[in-house]
Image (tube, coloured by chain):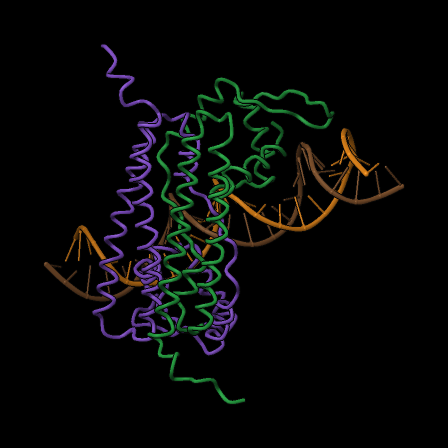
Chain colours: A purple, B green, C orange, D brown
Amino acid sequence: MTGYALKLAISQTIGHFWNESVGQIYPTLRRLEDQGLLERTRAMRRDSSVFSVTPSGLKQLRSLLREPPPPQTRRNALLLRLFFGRHLGPAHCRALLQGARDQATRELESYEHLSAALADEAGYAHDREYWLLTLMAGIHAARATIAWADESLQRLPDTMGQTSKRPGRPR
Amino acid sequence: MTGYALKLAISQTIGHFWNESVGQIYPTLRRLEDQGLLERTRAMRRDSSVFSVTPSGLKQLRSLLREPPPPQTRRNALLLRLFFGRHLGPAHCRALLQGARDQATRELESYEHLSAALADEAGYAHDREYWLLTLMAGIHAARATIAWADESLQRLPDTMGQTSKRPGRPR
DNA sequence: GGCCACATGTAAACTGTTACATGATTGT
DNA sequence: ACAATCATGTAACAGTTTACATGTGGCC
């Protein structure tokens, strides 16, 4: 496919857990072509090229996939804020939790749609099971986030003693 | 605290979801001092400085914490590999899942220890509830990973038709 | 004719890690 | 004396995003 089509394909499949920007894609396509891992064929349009994987490119892909996944760099901006929750106050923290819950709900819905679509679709026979695996990971993660947010929303105001102690300050 | 102590403190508290390297810490401490957000006091040792937050630094911290969390850059090396699972084969994918499950199990244990320790510990009175929140996030996420891995490990060999079709190849 | 989607590419800016270099202090 | 830990800092590198610049082709 073309670089442009590749970017689209990524965002429509693995986009939930991996993304690349144009600034990465085009230089990389050229580099891989220079290394003989991709080959370029002219497309209909004069200014566009369609790339395909060469046998040695496929070999290289499989070899890279076999490398152990490097330890994830975990950086969670939401948890960072909640860790300093004392400086934000319970109300703000509850808003953050609610936001996280809403987003997880939207994601869950989207994953379930994708999962249903994947089951129906003809083709992708060999990939389907694996793609389903990644969708299930998203579904489990989203459900966990929702459960955590609900539990936390329930706990947060009571333990802070904010529910009954400040019954609206006078104007 | 000193830059060194800060690094240690980070890895022992928020280390599970946020980290900074020395290459960030020291230049940043100096920058914040120049901006009047931190002040430096000489420590016992001649070559070390103890930093503390100034009032304007605290104000700035709170203002930064109030900024909405930027959308996470999601990049999951494990799911990327599983997405291309067809090129790896079921056996390798099962190994990846088992590895993820093991790691999540270790993390879960560590979170539960920390959570128990936090409940006992005197002090941290105002922070405890919020720190518990972040620990609970880790616990929910780890449990979700374990459940997902178990479910996937159960499904993977059956659907691939590997269980009965290849009854041990001859030597 | 003008808009939109398709398509490519680069430069600058920004972010972050790692390796290296250096030295002080403490305990054995 | 020596090792371990405490402590600071920088330079090189690696990775990544964003904004900009440019142009094609189809369709209404």
Foreground pick, B77 / B168: B168
Q: x and y percent of residue B91 in the render?
A: 45, 73
Q: x and y percent of residue A42 in the render?
A: 36, 73
Foreground pick, A153 / C10: A153
Query: In the picture, which quadrant includes the N terminus of chain A?
Result: bottom left
Q: Is residue B140 above or below residue B61?
A: below
Query: In the picture, which quadrant includes the C terminus of chain A?
Result: top left
Foreground pick, A123 / A3: A123
Residue plotted at (54% across, 26% down) = B32
Foreground pick, B111 / B61: B111
Q: Is residue B83 above or below residue C16?
A: below
B67 lies left or right of A167? right
B62 lies left or right of A151? right
Q: Is residue A14 above or below residue B68?
A: below
Displayed quadrant of residue A2: bottom left
A100 lies left or right of C21? left
Residue plotted at (38% across, 82% down) = B164
Q: x and y percent of residue A71 in the render?
A: 52, 54
Q: x and y percent of residue D4 in the render?
A: 74, 42
Q: Is residue B112 above or below residue C5?
A: above
Residue placed farthest to the bottom in the image?
A: B170
Residue placed farthest to the top in the image?
A: A171
B71 lies left or right of B127? left
Displayed quadrant of residue B171: bottom right
